[in-house]
């Protein structure tokens, strides 16, 4: 996912028994406190151990200085268990906390804390701040992990609880008055129980705590990380019981869901709530949750048509409380330009949109504020619980349309950290919830302030939040943003918690909830540097899928990060229909790369199985894991369903825009439409789940914008009515992420070959739905085991004589030919001669006249398929 420029095993170690504590020795007079350090390079990993990269000095002493004393340190070595828990610290010097001082650890953690090195005479040699996540987990998390946090109602009375072990005091600010809270010293949880009259009241916590980011004790007024409801713009939390019948839409308790679809068979539409309806003139609630209740709108009619063809899930981009959108319509800015009259290649549209982007109603939403409350800007009224009711009505309506609902969840980072107003977790337990670098600074490899789900209470927050969305909002699946930044153990804990939910007790069958995410391997935790990550390779065999970028890149060509966007691929004309880009190389280089791309796509069609064996285009017998993808194995899955196939998603250019950059500029609308369907077919006809961005079947464009997270409605809205165009030619895309591509974009935006008519958009959508019908009605596309795939799936023409630009797949009684070339192709399949095959009924009776020209010659076993066409044949 892309993010604003400002803005993945091991859980934290929990000691079962602390070291024996001896009677402390009376402290000697303490030297003056050192200056407040600007870095925190010491790490207190458990009650008895500190790791600090400090230069050893003969006769020097190391200590932890705190407000009321000091803890003595002595050199030691990390145990095998500690090195395993903290692999990134295993080679650093370690120090043992004197057993006589350990009883003071809880006190020391509630104020200023400095690691010091002094000479025997007291001269300060070194000083640094102290990272305390490990010791906080060691001392508190065993009890805290069992606590119910946030507002919890018992017999109508609420108890409010917040974990703040380092706070000096915590009080509840409720409806204009302050109420003291009581600290549980064993868990670090502060609680207060109130009367039934507290229900619906606004509140915040008043937390007095040492904040290393500013080097002083602060008093923070902070909303509840476990909020269940909010006032407008998240100014206050609300004391709300989500089980209150008043918040349930009619029929909610007995909601009937569409039949559950196993993840390996899931066909998913990725959809942004505002994009869905903001430009839909037939919607009574544009841009809102309630737009999904407008059953007669163009958008809902299209979703029902996709569901009837086989789409099973709608994946909603983040819909939790978002930090960067003003929630009241009256406070949302709009571009002060008549955008529709400007030239299709003008820079004026993007400039006008950019001027209001920070204050408009638009953002993808990958900037979480409160993880477990619906976003208020999508509600008819952001004040109070209307958003809860309307989110539930949205889920109810989607289920009624035959679609299950997936939520995109973003627990890997926060919108801000430190003392920023948009920082919540870090203002309650400073330095705990964020992942810190060696010097104590917050890691930002996500382009935002990373969280640390490897720490017990952040991991607990992830699990608790997901379970709440599942139980209280009946969400059917979760897509984890940057899942590789989570520990594998954390994601498995989510799976385990969901699996305990039952229809009888919880109103949902948790075992049928699907999970998938981005298993990318990068950043400070790359290659399991700190814990076993939830990456593509590591999640294989868990039943939790990861996005498969291998086949995606082969289909599109190049990578999303190419300087020249004209690098072609299988579905964009490489070698067989070359463009003018020098980045594609010589014809010989193009041919070689295309054939390698075809091997990558074969692996993708197998479900990216690591152990799937086939003959590659050089004639070698290989496994999926033997095929190279930029130095990594192409095949990484253990079973179908481990890898999620896709040709486009919200990140990077839409599929149409990618093909605009890559297909020859003279390629006409009809051929562009056909190549779009062919690209989608590589995902839809693969083993395992597949995802496409909403509107892609309608040739959706964002006017070549590669990162539209904050590009407003003008570039992002879906146009369900083909007469409104497909979004192409709405001006040059925003400069911030696209200006370096403007020289390539400008001539395309005025090219009549890219003006798509209703025949093109509606034809592409109908052809895609035909493929969905084949995918979801033919059991061979949903095989359950790697052994079944190996037995049923083959590429009979693979080898040194394989036709560049054509893939022929045999799957049980089916033969699939993907002809990406601009010419008709005949494929003679060994073993097919004498058998009877016919074009699949879904295509034979479908709307695509071209595919109906496909033919089969029984005597020779030859399948003939028109140019730029995917044809599925079934044995008679």
Image: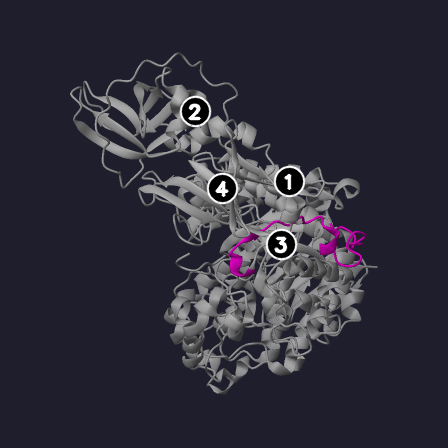
Q: Which residue is mark 1?
A: 495
Q: Quadrant of residue 800?
A: bottom right
- Secondary structure under tag 1 reads helix
- Secondary structure under tag 2 reads helix
Q: Which residue is mark 4?
A: 171
Q: Earlier in the sequence, mark 3 or mark 2?
A: 2
**Residue shown at 78%/66% (left/top)?**
842
Q: Is residue 258 magenta?
A: yes
Q: Earlier in the sequence, mark 2 or mark 1?
A: 2
- Secondary structure under tag 4 reads strand
Q: CA distance from mark 4 to mark 2?
A: 36 Å
Residue furthest right in the image? 876
Q: Earlier in the sequence, mark 4 or mark 3?
A: 4
Q: Which residue is mark 2?
A: 82
At which x and y percent is residue 413? 47, 49
Q: CA distance from mark 1 to mark 4?
A: 35 Å
User: Mark 4 near mark 3, Cβ–Cβ under 8 Å?
Assistant: no
Label 1: few (<14), some (14–19) or many (≥20) C-alpha neighbours in 10 Å: many
Q: Earlier in the sequence, mark 1 or mark 4?
A: 4
Marks counted in the figure total 4
At which x and y percent is residue 722? 64, 79
Judged by depth in the image, the label closer to the viewer, 1 or 4, is: 4
Which residues are drawn in magenta? 232-261
Q: Quadrant of residue 499?
A: top right
Judged by depth in the image, the label closer to the viewer, 4 or 3, is: 4
Q: CA distance from mark 4 to mark 3?
A: 34 Å
Q: CA distance from mark 1 to mark 3?
A: 15 Å
Q: Which residue is mark 3?
A: 407
- Placement of the C terminus among the 4 image quadrants: bottom right
Q: Is residue 776 magenta?
A: no
């Amino acid at each position: 996912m892309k993010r604003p420029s400002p803005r993945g095993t091991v859980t934290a170690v929990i000691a079962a028994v602390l070291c024996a504590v001896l009677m402390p020795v009376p402290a000697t007079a303490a030297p003056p406190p050192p200056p407040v350090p600007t870095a925190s390079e010491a790490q207190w990993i458990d009650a008895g151990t500190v790791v600090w990269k400090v230069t050893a000095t003969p006769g020097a002493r190391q200590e932890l200085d705190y407000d009321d004393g000091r803890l003595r340190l002595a050199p030691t070595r990390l145990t095998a268990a500690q090195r395993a828990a903290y692999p990134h610290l295993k080679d650093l010097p370690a120090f043992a906390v004197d057993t006589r001082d350990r009883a003071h650890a809880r006190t020391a953690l509630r104020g200023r804390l400095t690691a010091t090195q002094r000479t025997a005479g007291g001269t300060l040699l070194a000083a640094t701040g102290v990272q305390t996540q490990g010791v906080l987990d060691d001392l508190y998390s065993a009890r805290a992990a069992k606590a119910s946090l946030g507002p919890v109602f018992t017999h109508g009375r609420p108890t409010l609880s917040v974990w703040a072990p380092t706070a000096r005091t915590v009080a509840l600010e409720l409806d204009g008055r302050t109420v003291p809270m009581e600290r549980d010293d064993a868990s670090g949880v502060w609680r207060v129980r109130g009367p039934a009259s507290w229900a619906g009241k606004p509140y915040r916590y008043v937390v007095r705590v040492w904040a290393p980011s500013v080097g002083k004790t602060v008093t923070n007024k902070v909303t509840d990380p476990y909020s269940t409801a909010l006032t407008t713009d998240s100014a206050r939390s609300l004391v709300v019981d989500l089980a209150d019948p008043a918040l349930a839409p009619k029929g909610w308790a007995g909601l009937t869901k569409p039949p559950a679809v196993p993840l390996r068979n899931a066909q998913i539409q990725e959809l942004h709530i505002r994009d869905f309806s903001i430009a839909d003139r037939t919607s009574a609630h544009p841009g809102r949750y309630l737009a999904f209740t407008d059953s007669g709108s163009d958008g809902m009619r299209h979703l029902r048509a996709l569901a009837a063809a086989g789409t099973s899930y709608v994946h909603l981009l983040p819909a939790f409380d978002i930090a960067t959108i003003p929630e009241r319509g009256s406070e949302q800015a709009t571009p002060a330009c008549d955008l529709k009259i400007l030239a299709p290649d003008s820079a004026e549209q993007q400039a006008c949109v950019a001027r209001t982007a920070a204050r408009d109603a638009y953002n993808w939403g990958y900037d979480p504020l409160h993880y477990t409350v619906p976003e208020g800007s999508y509600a008819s009224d952001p004040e109070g619980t209307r958003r809860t009711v309307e989110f539930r009505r949205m889920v109810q309506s989607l289920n009624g349309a035959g679609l299950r609902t997936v939520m995109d969840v973003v627990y890997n980072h926060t919108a801000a950290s430190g003392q920023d107003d948009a920082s919540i977790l870090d203002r309650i337990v400073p330095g705990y919830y964020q992942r810190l670098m060696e010097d104590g600074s917050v890691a930002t490899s996500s382009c935002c302030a990373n969280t640390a789900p490897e720490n017990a209470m952040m991991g607990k927050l992830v699990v608790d939040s997901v379970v709440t969305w599942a139980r209280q909002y009946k969400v059917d699946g979760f897509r984890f943003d940057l899942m590789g930044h989570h520990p594998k153990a954390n994601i498995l804990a989510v799976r385990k918690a969901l699996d305990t939910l039952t229809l009888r007790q919880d109103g949902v069958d948790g075992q049928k909830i699907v999970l998938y995410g981005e298993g990318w391997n990068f950043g400070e935790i790359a290659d399991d540097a700190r814990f076993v990550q939830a990456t593509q390779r590591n999640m294989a065999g868990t039943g939790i899928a990861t996005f498969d970028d291998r086949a995606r890149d082969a289909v599109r060509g190049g990578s999303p990060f190419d300087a020249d966007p004209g690098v072609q691929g299988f579905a964009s004309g490489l070698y067989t229909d070359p463009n003018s880009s020098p980045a594609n190389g010589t014809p010989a280089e193009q041919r070689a790369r295309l054939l390698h791309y075809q091997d990558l796509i074969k692996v993708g069609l197998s479900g990216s199985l690591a152990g799937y064996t086939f003959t590659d285009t050089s004639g070698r017998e290989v496994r999926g894991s033997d095929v190279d993808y930029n130095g990594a194995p192409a095949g990484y899955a253990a079973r179908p369903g481990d890898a999620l196939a896709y040709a486009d998603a919200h990140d990077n250019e839409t599929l149409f825009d990618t093909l605009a950059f890559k297909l020859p500029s003279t390629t006409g609308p009809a051929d562009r439409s056909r190549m779009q369907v062919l690209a989608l077919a590589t995902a839809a006809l693969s083993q395992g789940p597949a995802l496409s961005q909403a509107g892609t079947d309608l040739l959706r464009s964002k006017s070549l914008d590669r990162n539209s997270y904050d590009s407003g409605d003008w570039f992002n809205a879906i146009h369900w009515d083909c007469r409104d165009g497909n979004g192409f030619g709405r001006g040059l895309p925003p400069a911030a992420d696209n200006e370096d591509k403007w020289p390539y974009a400008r001539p395309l935006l005025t090219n009549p070959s890219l003006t798509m008519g209703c025949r093109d958009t509606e034809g592409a959508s109908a052809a895609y739905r035909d493929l969905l019908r084949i995918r979801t009605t033919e059991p061979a596309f949903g095989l359950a085991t790697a052994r079944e795939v190996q037995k049923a799936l083959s590429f009979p023409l693979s080898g040194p004589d394989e036709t560049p630009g054509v893939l022929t797949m045999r799957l049980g009684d089916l033969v699939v030919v993907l002809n990406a070339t601009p010419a008709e192709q005949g494929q003679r399949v060994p073993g097919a001669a004498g058998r009877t095959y016919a074009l699949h009924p879904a295509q034979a009776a479908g709307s695509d006249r071209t595919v109906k020209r496909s033919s089969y010659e029984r005597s020779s076993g030859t399948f003939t398929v028109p140019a730029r066409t995917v044809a599925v044949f079934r044995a008679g």
